[in-house]
Each structure stands twice: as C-alpha cells, then as structure tokens.
Image: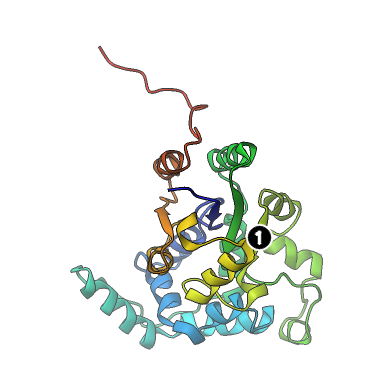
Amino acid sequence: MIFKAIIFDIGGVVVGSPLFAINRYEKELGLPFQYLNVAITAQGHGGAFQCFERNELDLYTFYRRFGEELSNVDNNNTAYIKFCKSRGQEVPKLPTKLQVDGRELFGQMMRYSTQVDPKVRIAINKLKESRKFTIAALTNNFAPPTEMVADAQSSAAKAPSLEEELQHLGLGESQYELRKMFDHYIESAVVGKRKPDPEFYKHALHLLNVQASEVVFLDDIGPNLKAAQKLGITTIRVDSSDSTPALAQLSKLTGVPLLDHLPKPSSKL
C-alpha cells in the first residue's frame, strides 16, 4: 500500500497528554483515578470542554461551565459507577461534595501539553526529509484568547492580563515552533468540528487531497482511532508514556527508518 499523508494527533502523541495533568489534579483532590476524565467525557456533545474545542464558548464562559460540570457530584458519580461496572472494577469511595476550579485545572492540562516528544520530533523530520509524505496535525484544540472578555473583568477582584492568561495556558513561542513542524495544522477550533466526528476527518482528507486508504493516522485515544478506521484510514495507537512502539509501526508502514538513531539494546551473554 502506498501512503501519501501521515496525520498526527497532538496531545498525547506529539506532546505530553493532558490526561496526566487531569490525573494529578484528581490526586490532589483525593478523587479516584480517572474520575474527572470520565466526567469530562460523560458531558457528551454539549459539554463545556467539547463546545470549547469547537470554538462555541469564550474562554471565561468555558472556565465557569467546566468547573460547574466537574463539580456536579450527582451526575459524575453516576457516570463513574457506570465506568467501573463496564470494566468489572469495584466502585471506590466517591465524593459527596466537590469544588473544581475550571481555570486552574485547564491551565494545568495545557501547560503539561507543551513539551514535544523528541523521538516524535525526529520521526517527523525524517518523514519530511524523505519527501514522500504530506505531514499534518489533526487536533482537538481551542482558540487562544486575543483579549480579556468582560466576564473575566467582573468575576475576579484582580483579573489576569492577556499576557498572564496566555502564560497560564502555556501558550507562547513553543506553540509557534510546534505548528512549524507540519505542512498542515488542522484544528477543531477553526473547523468547528472535533474528533471523533467523521466530518472532521473528511475535512482533513479533502484539505490534503488524499483518499482515506492513502493515510496513516496516529492518536492515543481509542474512539478517535475507531472513527478513522471506519473511514478506511490506517491507524496506529500511541502509548502516551512511550512513543517507541508506535514509531516502530510507522517505520514499517512508511519504509522510513525512524528509530535508527536510538541506541540498540545490549545483548546479554
């Protein structure tokens, strides 16, 4: 099979996964593992996080709604019980009261997602040097603030400046450098659709002028990969804690040595 395009997810594939920041925040609040991640997913299409990634909410409306939704223990306990039962896990002690700071949690998530995996950076550079593939990013993201809205000014005694807010979100030169790694940087906040919506993938295929069968897509989230597979796209699941196995798969599919710079494991006599 001849591939013409390689499409990378960003968070958890090219940079650190925000899920690790969520898990750390859960631990700080004494919550069960994955409690908040399950809560975010359970909000569905109309959830604050989902709407924000389609650019349907301004930043401070998102912060407020995000915190409110994640603080709703009745809804979130129900979702977590369902999550545990679906995996045959014992339901741990659940919170009876919870106050999640939407701004603080989201800031931690974004700041965790700024460091590029050096192995992935080298792999992308090698793929580009081969001149055989279009290299694209397909990311669920948000539109960075360009000004502070009225809600921010009225909701805090001392509202942060735009510069302070961008720093809180980990936005700066690193984001510019990240975008430069790709021939196309396809964003949910710009397109108005997000993974796993099939239309988001179709938009990418149209933009890249390729057929689904000509694409390899890397992501760390199962539903995103399944949606791509249904369209006929070849997928690779990335372990957010170690990209090496995924890059080995990508190397086999593309015929480009992507890991030959790594030291070979020493053999034991």
Taking 17 as reference, is 179 left or right? right
Where, by quadrant of the figure, is residue 176 drawn? bottom right
Q: Position of residue 191 (x, y in %)?
A: 64, 75
Q: Position of residue 171 (x, y in %)?
A: 71, 59
Please tell me which residue is depicted at 43% across the width and 65% down the height of the picture.
Answer: 228
Viewer-nearest residue: 134 or 31: 134
Give the residue type that dot 1 points to: Tyr
Viewer-nearest residue: 246 or 145: 246
* In this view, 117 is above or below 20: above
Where, by quadrant of the figure, is residue 132 drawn? top right
Q: Residue extending furthest top? A: 269
Where, by quadrant of the figure, is residue 93 drawn? bottom left
Q: Position of residue 256 (x, y in %)?
A: 51, 36
Taking 29 as reference, is 49 left or right? right
Residue carrying label 1: 185
How many marks the image carries: the answer is: 1
Q: Is disc 1 placed on a helix, strand or loop?
A: strand
Taking 71 as reference, is 108 left or right? right
Q: Position of residue 200 (x, y in %)?
A: 54, 73
* In this view, 100 is above or below 163: below
Q: Quadrant of the C terminus?
A: top left
Q: How is the image coloured?
A: rainbow
Please tell me which residue is depicted at 73% across the width and 86% down the height of the picture.
Answer: 151
Q: Residues within 10 Å of mark 1 (few under 14, many from 20)?
A: some
* In this view, 152 is above or below 118: below
Taking 65 as reference, is 87 left or right? left
Viewer-nearest residue: 234 or 4: 4
